Image (tube, grey):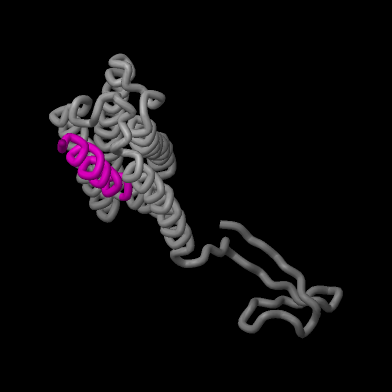
């Protein structure tokens, strides 16, 4: 809450404003609160998500073009371990469900429950990243690094870009947990939780595309 005073010439004050007369004959306009456009943050975040869609669309297109260029190296059928990837997918999809529970508790104004579900969401996201790093380490150990072929270059670029998004999402989630623990479920914090919710579900949708287009189709002959 802030008090802001703006000075206008006499007769030039906006209609409906509180305009006490000043000794010098000028009129003053008093704002008793900060102005925030309704839903402005959510609209801006939707614009960001659409730009991120374009980034992933380009990466999927590059993989679609290069995904069969093995350069005499290993193929996806030889490298991918579907049980491991399926477990990783389960972690990320469950994290989307637990974040949904956090949003439901936010509507009920239960701060401790929100923090608890956010912690579970962060733990599942960390488990997802751990398995992804384990997969990358195994591939590089087997000589199937991103430098081996165009197929592996496009694979590592697409999957690691998604992993970086999950990493930033976890950092954002931890930051919001600190903010909610310190200031409670204020209107700005609820708005930030909604933005992170859209971001987290967006990453789930992208990963479903990765799992289907890269892994499932990659093991086909």
Comparing 191 with 197, the one in front is 197
State the predominant SS element of the stretch in magenta: helix
Comparing 101 with 97, the one in front is 97
Can residue 212 be seen in this snapshot? Answer: yes
Determine whether 44 is above or below 6 in the image. above
Q: Locate the C terminus and report the quarter of the image it occupies.
A: top left
Magenta run includes residue 55: no
**Residue at the farthest right position:** 24
Coordinates of residue 62 in the picture (x, y in percent): 38, 44
Give me the residue at 62% from left, 67% from top. Answer: 31
Q: Quadrant of residue 67?
A: top left
Comparing 219 with 118, the one in front is 219
Coordinates of residue 185 in the picture (x, y in percent): 37, 49
Give me the residue at 32% from left, 17% from top. Answer: 143
Determine whether 178 is above or below 78 in the image. below
Give me the residue at 30% from left, 47% from top. Answer: 206
- Give the total of numbered labels: 0
Determine whether 217 is above or below 39 in the image. above
Magenta run includes residue 213: yes
Give me the residue at 19% from left, 25% from top. Answer: 78
Q: Locate the N terminus and report the quarter of the image it occupies.
A: bottom right
**Residue at the farthest left position:** 83
Question: In this picture, which residue range is highlighted in magenta?
Answer: 202-221
Coordinates of residue 116 in the picture (x, y in percent): 26, 37
Comparing 26 with 92, the one in front is 92
Coordinates of residue 86 in the picture (x, y in percent): 16, 34
Q: Is residue 43 left or right of residue 25?
A: left
Q: Quadrant of residue 120?
A: top left
């Amino acid at each position: 809450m802030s008090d802001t005073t703006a000075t206008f010439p006499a007769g030039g004050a906006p209609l409906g404003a509180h305009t006490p007369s000043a000794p010098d004959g000028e009129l003053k306009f008093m704002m008793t609160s900060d102005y925030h456009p309704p839903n402005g943050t959510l609209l801006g975040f939707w614009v960001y998500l659409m730009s991120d869609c374009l980034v992933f669309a380009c990466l999927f297109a590059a993989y679609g073009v290069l995904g069969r260029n093995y350069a005499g190296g290993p193929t996806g059928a030889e490298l991918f371990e579907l049980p491991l990837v399926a477990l990783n997918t389960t972690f990320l999809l469950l994290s989307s469900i637990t974040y949904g529970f956090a949003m439901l508790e936010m509507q009920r104004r239960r701060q401790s429950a929100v923090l608890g579900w956010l912690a579970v969401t962060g733990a599942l996201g960390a488990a997802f990243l751990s398995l992804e790093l384990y997969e990358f380490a195994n591939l590089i150990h087997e000589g199937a690094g991103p430098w081996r072929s165009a197929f592996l270059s496009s694979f590592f670029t697409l999957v690691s870009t998604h992993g970086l998004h999950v990493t930033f999402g976890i950092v954002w989630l931890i930051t919001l947990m600190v903010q909610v623990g310190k200031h409670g479920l204020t209107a700005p914090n609820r708005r930030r939780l909604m933005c992170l919710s859209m971001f987290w579900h967006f990453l789930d949708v992208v990963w479903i595309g990765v799992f289907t287009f890269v892994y499932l189709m990659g093991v086909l002959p």
